[in-house]
Amino acid sequence: MAILLSWRFTPLLALATLLLVLPLLFHSNLHYRLGALVWTFGLAAIGVNILMGYAGQVSLGHAGFFGIGAYSVAIGPAHFGLAPLFAGLIGVAAAAAIAWIVGKAILRFQGLYLGIATLAFGILVTLVLNNEAQVTGGPDGMQVKAAALFGWRISGAVTWYWVSGAVMLAGAFLALNLHSSPSGRALRALHDSEVAAAVVGVDTARKKLQAFVIAAVYAAVAGAMLALMNGFVTPDVSSLLSSIEMVTMVVIGGMGSIFGSVVGAAFITVLPQLLVWLHDFETAFLGLTIVLFLVLLPAGIVPSLVDLFRRLGR
């Protein structure tokens, strides 16, 4: 049993080790900020991986929930005088409620049709954030008040590195526990075959809705953290490109792999910073690199490397 528990939480131990060791390699606040961005987007990717890697459901509009979380910490203090962290909690609850309502309507679809339905939701959120300028600031965005906890002001790249890292580890811990729970096994059965899962007694509609709501909560928490970290938010956080980036993080890192979600987030976040010297060819080279990874490592970076090490071990 002890071996089983240690094996299950190996990804969590690896992430915690990275969180503690990486600052030894950092030389400026820029490095801390990149690390904080990786942990933040890694948290969102973990949520999308629960939906796609565990439950096998496609979402092309999950950045909509990311945007709801991000704007909650801006709108709450600006229009209602709420503390940013309390406003963020309300935003996460709102994202969960909206996910439940939307999921009840669209999760009856499958495959491409589900992808289009989620895409429509993401576009709708972006349109609302752009057009309701009196509330959201429109395309120009909004300032976000700095968060404080018991008088401690949460600001600065170094502080957000540790805060976002701690939240990401908590999210990874919950996801790993879900994976080994009865609900996690039901979700994985649903991923393999919805018909077979229903035959053995899995309430497929309920489980798909649970995964959708959980993924929305992860995205909303990550969105709130990003907005508080940046001190500013625009409707771009809920754009189609943001949704595609989240899906790409999951696919590149490895479907069903929690550690892979963070690796994919690091890939998408850090690689563009390393390619700035290419100037006009940066986007083209980034796209080519992603295609090569998908062709050479179709299972994702982490699952492919794990399989390789197992073969070498034999």
Image: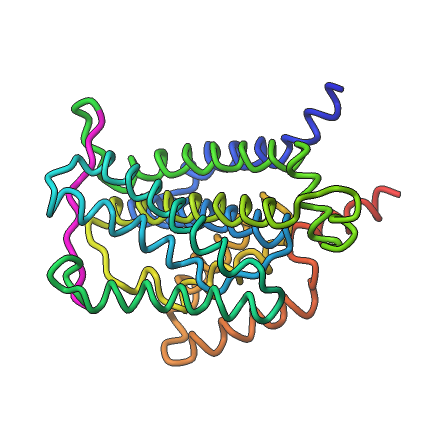
3 inside magenta stretch: no
Kindly identify the residue that appears in the image at 51 percent across and 32 percent down.
16
**In front here: 108 or 300?**
108
Highlighted range, magenta: 139-149
Q: Is residue 11 left or right of residue 245?
A: right
Q: Is residue 68 left or right of residue 12?
A: left
Q: Is residue 194 visible?
A: yes
In which image quadrant can residue 275 be found? bottom left
Kindly identify the residue that appears in the image at 66 percent across and 32 percent down.
181
Kindly identify the residue that appears in the image at 39 percent across and 45 percent down.
97
Q: Quadrant of the N terminus?
A: top right
Residue 158 percent location from the top left of the image: 30, 38
Residue 180 percent location from the top left of the image: 67, 33
Q: Quadrant of the C terminus?
A: top right
Kindly identify the residue that appears in the image at 60 percent across and 72 percent down.
291
Q: Is residue 197 left or right of residue 96?
A: right
How many marks the image carries: the answer is 0
Q: Is residue 171 left or right of residue 231?
A: right
Residue 18 percent location from the top left of the image: 51, 37
Residue farthest to the top, as pictured: 2
Residue 289 percent location from the top left of the image: 56, 70
